[in-house]
Image (tube, grey):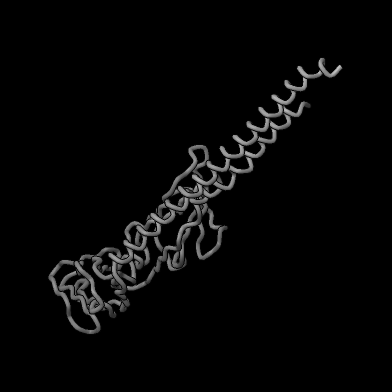
Amino acid sequence: MTLETQMFQNAHSGSQWLLPPLTMLLLFGDLLKAVVKRDPPWIQVLKDDTVTLTCEGTHNPGNSSTQWFHNQSSTWGQVQASYTFKATVNDSGEYRCRMAHTSLSDPVHLEVISDWLLLQTPQLVFLEGERITLRCHGWKSIQLARISFLQNGEFVSFHPYNVSYSISNANHSHSGDYYCKAYLGRTEHVSKPVTITVQGSATASTSSLVWFHAAFCLVMCLLFAVDTGLYFCVRRNLQTSGEDWRRSLSVGKYKAPQDK
C-alpha cells in the first residue's frame, strides 16, 4: 500500500468519524412520539359503552404492527393500530402504544364505571383560555330529560334535553367539582362528581413550546455547520499534505541523476 493510498483512506475514515454524531442526533431528534386517541374522547365511560383506541404515528409500510401497553403490561394481545371494544370494568387503566418508527406514547387514561348516570370530560386539567366541554351520559345511551349541571353544588346549567355544557374561555373560577342530574324515564339520577382544574395559560404554554422548537432547530443547525466545517477542513488539509508529498517525490526523482 502506497503512502498516498493510505492518506486517502485516512481522510475517508476521518469523514466517517465526523458525520455519525450529527446523524445520530438527527435520527433521535426526528423520532416522533406515538399518540393514543380515544373515540369517543371522554376519560370516563359507562360499562357496555363502545370505545375505539387508535395509535397514531409514523409507521413502516413493511411493518404495520403496533405494540400496546395496558397498565404497564406489554403482554396485551393487540397488534393493530386501531381497535374497538365494549367497555368492561377490567378495561379501566392507562393505555400506551408504540409503532415501528415512534417512541412510546404518553399514557391515556380510561375509567369504566358501572352506574346509571355519568359526567364525562375529555380531560381533568385545562389551561386558562381553553374550552371545557362536559357531557351528561346515561347507561346504554338512554335518552335523558331535565338535565342539570352543577359546580360545587351550585346550578350552572339546565336544559330539557341538551346533554352538553360548555365553557368557551376557562379561567381559575371554573375549577371545582362538577356533576349532573337527569331523569331516565320517571326516575332522577345523580352522577358522581368529577374534579376539574384550570391552571396556567394556554398562550404561555404555546409560546414555551415554540421557543423550545426554535432552540432545538438552532442547535441542530450549529452542529451541522460545525460538523461540515470540520469535515472539509480535515479533507483540505489531507489533500494538501498529499499534494506536498507527491511534489516532493517528483523533485527527488529529477534530482536523483544529478547526484550520481
Q: Residue at 63%, 39% (x, y): give it.
A: 16
Counting from the top left corner in percent of width and height, residue 207 is at 32, 62
Counting from the top left corner in percent of width and height, residue 6 is at 73, 31
User: In the displayed structure, does residue 238 sit left or right of residue 182?
Assistant: right
User: In the displayed structure, does residue 178 sit left or right of residue 16?
Assistant: left
Q: Is residue 133 visible?
A: no
Q: Is residue 58 visible?
A: yes
Q: Tell me if residue 250 comes above or below residue 97 in the rendering.
A: above
Q: Quadrant of the C terminus?
A: top right
Using the rendered view, name the quadrant where residue 192 is placed.
bottom left
| Residue at the extreme bottom of the image, as rendered | 153
Using the rendered view, name the quadrant where residue 235 is placed.
top right
Q: Residue at 41%, 56% (x, y): give it.
A: 215
Counting from the top left corner in percent of width and height, residue 26 is at 50, 47
| Residue at the extreme top of the image, as rendered | 257
Q: Nearer the viewer, residue 165 or 6?
A: 6
Number of marks in the rendered image: 0
Q: Quadrant of the N terminus?
A: top right
